[in-house]
Image (spheres, helix red, strand yellow):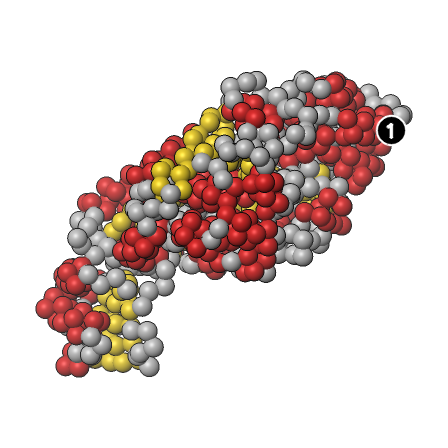
């Protein structure tokens, strides 16, 4: 490195590598109960992780949770953007999962036709 | 590149490594691969989290779940349930001893609540072998700032204003030290980092070097810039192989990136760092002995002045600071001296890392603001004394320090109040003692340590500590005489006043401070031939009280047939035969056998 500007630029690039250990912006939570897994939650999750990688988004946490009781609508995926209501999507196919990432997580537009609930 | 959705941080500090974290690491690798999750989950080996008592420690992000005592057999369950299904494995969470509730988050555990982790900020949070993670967390920003925005004088001023004092023990103002070396005549100057941590029970510097080596290197480079040195040495004992390995990696990485070596960040500043491995002599922690050792001579102190700031390594002006002192520097430059000075007390600024050992529930490392009370460190962070025993005293500052009794638990922990109480900050080792520790035996232990480590150059230390040790040994064996205490005090004063270096001058401290607070224990040993704590085997034994029902269990348990008595009658112990193994105490259903 030849200058402090280079160091700072490098730091900005490297930050993504450890950002996960700090509080992140948007959270995506995939229901991974037995019901969820049977209905294809893993495939939905793979699609989410893949889409995030493709779009090179860093300020996002993907985590899982257990069954919340609405097994009939599994796979369930929640998206929480900072300062916005928690949005729950039902019957999330890999295709829908990709739409959720591009439309909701990236652009902030809720995919209304797949929403099953919102918590303020 | 795939998106990494989860990080598994596994502690690879010396504590956790010895309780098996390496095997846990490989188990995670193979289990995660088996589940096909290798692309989306990253496993990181980190430095010490400080909570060594509960190791091996595993932290999983983004949730920040804190798993304790993770064995190889637990890994499958964590991978299957947590990493695959997102279900926290309850049984491996830390459990609060008081409420018995599980505490899932790192930050919510009592052990961490009262800590301010600055020096240890990255320890356990980053991979110490990765310069990328250090830079991502703000690393080398302070060096960059110093080189591009500040003059060397401004750097020294900033350190002066911060109020930082040497963390190696003495507490000399760091900024002052730097200005002395800066002002000394000569073109060639050196920066030396004292990593010869030798106090029994101290492992603060070791953990910093193992967990965040770049922070120390950055602090040294900043020092080099401010005093006009282009070369630095880290004197680290060879008994710290992991610290040396990580330092070597760190130096190579920093050189490759242009953060060490020639023309750093294009500013024309050159700085090289070398490692000198010490052979583990305690006296080499003394600065003049340390310098002699780097030069390849026998590690022995020499009289000061001249101080190393004027004539140090190869007779060139040399600035020596301790590991923790250097580790504080980057914070001071990035966040400012005022911010730093807002932490701590009027004369002791910032934080101090303490190593908690001895009779304490949470053995480990804790970084606390100066001015905290000893009670908070021992009870709130350390979790108190195990097995419901009573606190007796805490030895602070290792063999050069002193003990603090219960009535001083609320004393503010800072350089000056500790000196006043007859102890010292030292490097920060805290050895906690409960009611079963004999204070005479304790001072004998520390004195036998300093005696064995005395280099032998000056008579007061070589002969004086030997005589003191002989008297102490005699007292603990029941051969103490009237006048022994006074003789000990006289010798102690003489050694303190006349020994050549810090090792000798402070060697009598444990004796003086135990005499100050526990004189009655010495007197009991000498006059009554009794050890009140029941620790000195020649002065204590087991007795059967009137609570004895004559069941005969103790008689059967005794391996040397020292107990006699009729069934249903009171039994007695023959003290000539008794080997004080305590087997009878454990067997007695009526708790009728006591130590005294």
Which is nearer the eye, B261 or B282? Answer: B261
Task: Name the residue tied to disc 1.
Answer: B486
Q: Is residue B108 left or right of residue A84?
A: right
Q: Chain of mark 1?
A: B
Q: Which residue is at 89% across, 25% downward?
A: B482
User: In which quarter of the view is residue B549 placed?
Assistant: top right
Task: List x then y, in percent, for residue B244.
Answer: 42, 32
Asked whether residue A23 is in view, the answer is: yes
Is A51 drawn above or below residue B427 in the view shown?
below
Which residue is at the far left?
A: A95
Which is nearer the eye, B125 or B226? Answer: B226
Q: Is residue B534 left or right of residue B172?
A: right
Is B107 drawn above or below residue A118 in the view shown?
above
Count of marks, rendered view: 1
Task: List x then y, in percent, for residue B92.
Answer: 40, 51
The quadrant in which the C terminus of chain B is found is top right
Q: Which residue is at 64% across, 32% downward?
A: B307
User: In which quarter of the view is residue B251 placed?
Assistant: top left
Task: List x then y, in percent, for residue B329.
Answer: 50, 48
Q: Is residue B349 left or right of residue B220?
A: right
Which residue is at the far right?
A: B482
Is B196 drawn above or below residue A48 in the view shown?
above
Q: Which residue is at 68% across, 29% downward?
A: B304
Q: Which residue is at 35% across, 57% downward?
A: A21
User: In which quarter of the view is residue B338 placed?
Assistant: bottom right
Task: List x then y, in percent, for residue A31.
Answer: 24, 66
Q: Of helix, strand and loop, which one carries label 1?
A: helix
Which is nearer the eye, A25 or B484? Answer: A25
User: Badge 1: how crowded within 10 Å, few (<14), some, or many (20+)?
Assistant: few
């Amino acid at each position: 490195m030849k200058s402090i500007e280079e160091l700072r630029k490098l730091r900005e690039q490297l930050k993504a590598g450890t950002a996960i250990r700090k509080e992140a912006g948007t959270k995506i939570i995939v229901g991974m109960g037995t019901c969820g897994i049977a209905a294809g939650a893993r495939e939905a999750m793979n699609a989410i992780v893949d889409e995030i990688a493709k779009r090179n988004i860093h300020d996002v946490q993907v985590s899982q949770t257990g069954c919340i009781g609405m097994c009939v609508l599994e796979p369930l995926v929640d998206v929480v953007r900072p300062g916005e209501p928690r949005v729950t999507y039902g019957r999330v196919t890999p295709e829908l999962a990709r739409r959720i990432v591009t439309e909701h997580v990236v652009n902030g537009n809720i995919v209304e036709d797949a929403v099953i609930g919102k918590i303020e | 590149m795939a998106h990494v959705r989860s990080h598994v941080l596994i502690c690879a500090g010396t504590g956790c490594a010895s309780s098996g974290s390496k095997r846990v690491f490989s188990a995670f690798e193979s289990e995660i691969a088996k589940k096909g999750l290798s692309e989306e989950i990253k496993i990181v080996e980190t430095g010490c989290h400080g909570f060594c008592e509960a190791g091996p420690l595993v932290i999983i992000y983004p949730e920040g779940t804190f798993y304790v005592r993770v064995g190889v057999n637990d890994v499958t369950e964590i991978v299957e349930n947590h990493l695959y299904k997102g279900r926290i494995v309850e049984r491996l969470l830390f459990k609060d001893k008081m409420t018995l509730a599980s505490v899932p988050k790192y930050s919510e555990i009592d052990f961490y609540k009262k800590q301010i982790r600055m020096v240890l900020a990255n320890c356990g949070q980053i991979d110490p072998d990765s310069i990328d993670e250090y830079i991502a967390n703000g690393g080398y920003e302070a060096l960059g700032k110093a080189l591009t925005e500040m003059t060397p004088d401004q750097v020294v001023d900033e350190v002066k204003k911060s109020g930082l004092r040497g963390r190696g023990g003495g507490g000399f103002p760091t900024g002052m030290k730097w200005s002395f070396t800066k002002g000394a005549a000569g073109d060639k100057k050196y920066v030396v980092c004292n990593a010869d941590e030798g106090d029994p029970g101290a492992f603060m510097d070791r953990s910093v070097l193992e967990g965040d080596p770049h922070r120390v290197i950055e602090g040294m480079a900043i020092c080099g810039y401010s005093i006009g040195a282009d070369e630095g040495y880290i004197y680290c004992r060879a008994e710290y192989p992991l610290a040396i390995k990580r330092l070597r990696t760190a130096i190579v990485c920093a050189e490759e990136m242009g953060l060490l070596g020639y023309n750093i960040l294009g500013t024309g500043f050159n700085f090289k760092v070398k490692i000198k491995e010490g052979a583990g002599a305690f006296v080499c922690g003394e600065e003049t002995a340390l310098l002699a050792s780097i030069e390849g001579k026998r590690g022995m102190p020499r009289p000061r002045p001249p101080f190393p700031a004027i004539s140090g390594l190869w007779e060139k002006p040399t600035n020596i600071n301790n590991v923790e002192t250097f580790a504080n520097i980057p914070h001071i430059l990035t966040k400012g001296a005022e911010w730093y000075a807002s932490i701590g007390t009027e004369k002791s600024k910032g934080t101090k890392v303490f190593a908690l050992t001895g009779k304490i529930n949470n053995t480990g490392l804790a970084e606390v603001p100066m001015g905290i009370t000893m009670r908070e460190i021992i009870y709130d962070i350390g979790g108190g004394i195990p097995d419901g025993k009573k606190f007796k005293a805490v030895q602070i500052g290792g063999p050069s320090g002193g003990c603090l009794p219960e009535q001083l638990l609320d004393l503010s922990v800072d350089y000056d109040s500790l000196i006043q109480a007859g102890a010292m900050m030292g490097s920060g080792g805290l050895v906690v003692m409960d009611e079963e520790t004999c204070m005479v035996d304790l001072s004998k232990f520390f004195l036998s340590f300093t005696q064995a480590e005395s280099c032998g150059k000056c008579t007061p230390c070589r002969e004086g500590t030997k005589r003191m040790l002989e008297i102490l040994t005699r007292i603990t064996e029941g051969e103490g005489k009237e006048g022994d205490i006074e003789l000990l005090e006289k010798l102690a004063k003489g050694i303190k006043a006349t020994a050549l270096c810090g090792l000798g001058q402070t060697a009598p401290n444990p004796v003086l401070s135990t005499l100050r607070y526990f004189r009655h224990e010495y007197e009991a040993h000498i006059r009554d031939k009794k050890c009140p704590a029941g620790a000195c085997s020649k002065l204590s034994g087991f007795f059967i009280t009137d609570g004895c029902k004559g069941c005969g269990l103790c008689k059967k348990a005794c391996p040397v047939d020292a107990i006699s008595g009729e069934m249903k009658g009171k039994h007695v112990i023959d003290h000539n035969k008794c080997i004080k193994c305590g087997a009878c105490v454990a067997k007695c259903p009526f708790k009728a056998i006591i130590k005294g």
